[in-house]
Image (cartoon, helix red, strand yellow):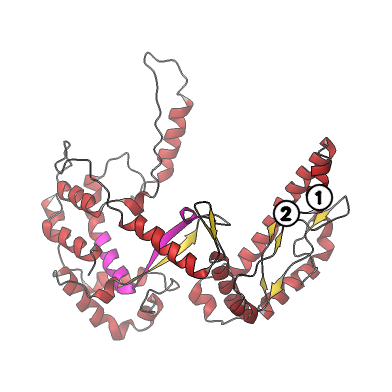
Amino acid sequence: MSSCILMKTKEETRRTGYVDDFNDMMGDTGLLDAGFEGEPFTWSNKRFWRRLDRVLYSKEWAETFNNTRARQVASKAEKKFDRDPSEANLIALNRSNAELVHALSLEAEYWKQKSNCKWLEAGERNTKFFHSLVKKKILKLTHRIMEGNQEITSPDQIRDSTASHFENLLSRNVAQRCSPIFPFQFAEMPDEVRHTICTIPSEYEVKEVVFSIDKDNVAGPDGFSSALYHAFWDFIARDVDDAVRDFFSSTPMPRSFKATTIVLIPKVDSPQIWNEFRPISLCNVTNKILSKLLYRKISQALPNLISPAQSGFMPGRLISDNILMAQEMIHHLDLRYKNSNLVIKLDMWKAYDRVSWNFLITIMQQMGFPPRFLNLIKHAIQKC
């Protein structure tokens, strides 16, 4: 247990050195903060509210008791306010909440600066702080989850619940309500572009794509990061070029090329349900290379096919343009016109996860992409 305050306020600037020393001690010794649930304050002198008690534990403790958390059911302040919900106590409570937000923001910013490092760059240092931080994040994510009205705390139940939820989400069949033949026409794709996107990438293009991948990105299931490809490119360049050439010659990719590790990234500070996590895929570098090459091919045709109103994910266009346009339209919505005005907001929940690949292939076919190129995309996204 620790009775040291990790956060500092304007009145405590003279104690900054002690606070930093204590934080450094936690990092150097690899101690983990168990976190805190419930009322954030544990002490008050009627002028200041603080959380003095903190639970710190070692890596060995975490490996044995991996669900350690500190929880306070109620505080003296809550009880006092419940007994006497006067206006004065309400004002004091609101002031304390404001101080809490400020204090927690200082603590969060400190640890963000302390630990905002990439895996490879920090992992090579092999510091106790880094590995303790990773361990803490893992434990925090697997602590508990809400499934309906039931709280799940068992690691086995959490694992099964995770697999069930995202398997249903990502494998759900989406009914196609549109006709395979669309009533509108896309701009005609130039013959030169149709020919270019089907050509085999040159050795220069392959190397350029390989070195465009951040060397500090997390490795895929095979454990090989792009840093290895950068460091030993002279030795593996021929093998990578051969793999790219085989793929663009319509040779099916080996199963290992498509292996993917799905990782859940929290979208909020304290996620409680699975919808508050964002699944991302950690692919092998070979898969990234082929995907980037396909993207470069597609990008050659997009300027002739994408509407000028589409601003996101287009080089030379800013997604903020449409945001500003929407604000202007809503601002003038209350002006008197001959006819009525209407704004429709669409909540495209999990749009990228629920989109139908068959629908996208059909759209690209209507856009005029050659069948050979569409087959390459199918080979890249279909299961082995």
Residue 326, image quadrant: top left
Q: Tell me if 190 is positioned left or right of 177 in this view.
A: left
Q: Which residue carries the number 2 mark?
A: 39
Q: Residue at x 66, y 68 (%)?
A: 34
**Neighbours of disc 2 within 10 Å: few (<14), some (14-19), many (20+):** some
**Spot occupied by residue 233 in the image (x, y as percentages of width and height):** 32, 81
Q: Choose between 42 and 381: the one closer to the eye.
A: 42
Q: What element carries label 2?
A: loop
Q: Which residue carries the number 1 mark?
A: 77
Give, as a single range, the part of the protein colored magenta. Answer: 273-296
Q: Which residue is drawn at 23% across and 74% down?
A: 203
Q: Is mark 1 on a helix, strand or loop?
A: helix
What is the three-letter code of the residue carrying label 2? Glu
Judge whether residue 351 is colored magenta. Answer: no
Q: Tell me if 100 is positioned left or right of 215 in this view.
A: right
Could you tell me if the residues under marks 2 and 1 are in contact, i.e. CB atoms within 8 Å? yes
Residue 201, image quadrant: bottom left
Instruction: Judge whether residue 26 can be spotted in this image.
Output: yes
Disc on the earlier residue, 2 or 1: 2
What is the three-letter code of the residue carrying label 1? Ala
